Amino acid sequence: MLDSVRLVDIATIAQIVSAVTNLFFVVVLAGGYYFTWRVSQKTLAKMKSQRTAMGRPLVIVQEDYDGLPEIDIGIRNISQTTARDITFEFSHKVESANEFVISELPYFKYGLDFLPPHGEINCYWGEINLLLPLLEKRGLEGGIFVTVRYKDLAGKSYESQWKLNLFLYKDTRIVNRWGMRNLVAAVERIAVSEEERMRREAEAQTDTGPAG
């Protein structure tokens, strides 16, 4: 009788151990599946976010320093898709050295209907050495913020903020190369004009033919 009880206890314990083991494996498998699912969901979300970022318009406003010491302000759509219903909000008005208010230009004041992919609009601001004292006098050493609001073709709205800060280039040694650039352009124009004159003279001689 005692042996039968012991056999029953052993069998019961074995069943319990087997059930616990099976439950453990189920928990491990479920945990592994959940972890894999979470990783895949995060990966998909990241890929979707990247695709959305690549497919959305991005309109920026920035200083153009290519022609230092002359400064332009550029509006650019640096994305692969068209932006529409573009508006601009300036934290302070943008003035040139002769007090012309650039931020009151029609496309800044009333906005743009659209800007195509990689489209840009540039306007002349002034010479940096003349603009810096004006900005300093107005207490704008921290820059002027520009908030840009726009939509994609589907009507989804976006907003971004940019800063115009000429003081990043304060006390920078600037070499004015505009003289040489203008000289090269003038020489090129002269060469083209001379080629055009020679071509016309040759055509005139061909039309009249040799004299008699």
Image (tube, rainbow, N blue to C red):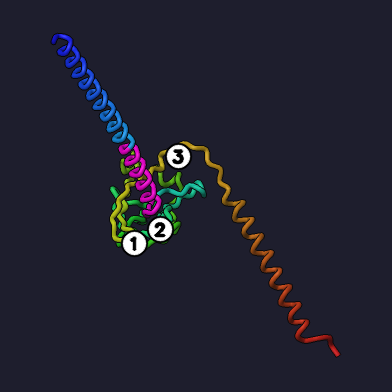
* Residue drawn at (26%, 29%) of the image: 27
Mark pair 1, 2: CA separation: 8 Å
Q: Which residue is mark 1?
A: 153
Q: Which residue sits furthest right?
A: 212
Label at residue 169: 3
Instruction: State the residue in front, 182 or 162.
Output: 162
Q: Which residue sits furthest bottom?
A: 212
Callout 2 amino acid: Thr
The image quadrant where one finds the C terminus is bottom right
Q: Which residue is mark 2?
A: 81
Q: Choose the circle earlier in sequence order: 1 or 3.
A: 1
Q: Choose the circle earlier in sequence order: 1 or 2.
A: 2
Callout 1 amino acid: Leu
Q: Is residue 196 above or below residue 64?
A: below
Instruction: State the residue in front, 114 or 30.
Output: 30
Element at label 2: loop
- Among the 4 quarters of the image, the one containing residue 81: bottom left
What is the number of callouts on the image?
3
Q: Is residue 200 above or below residue 3?
A: below
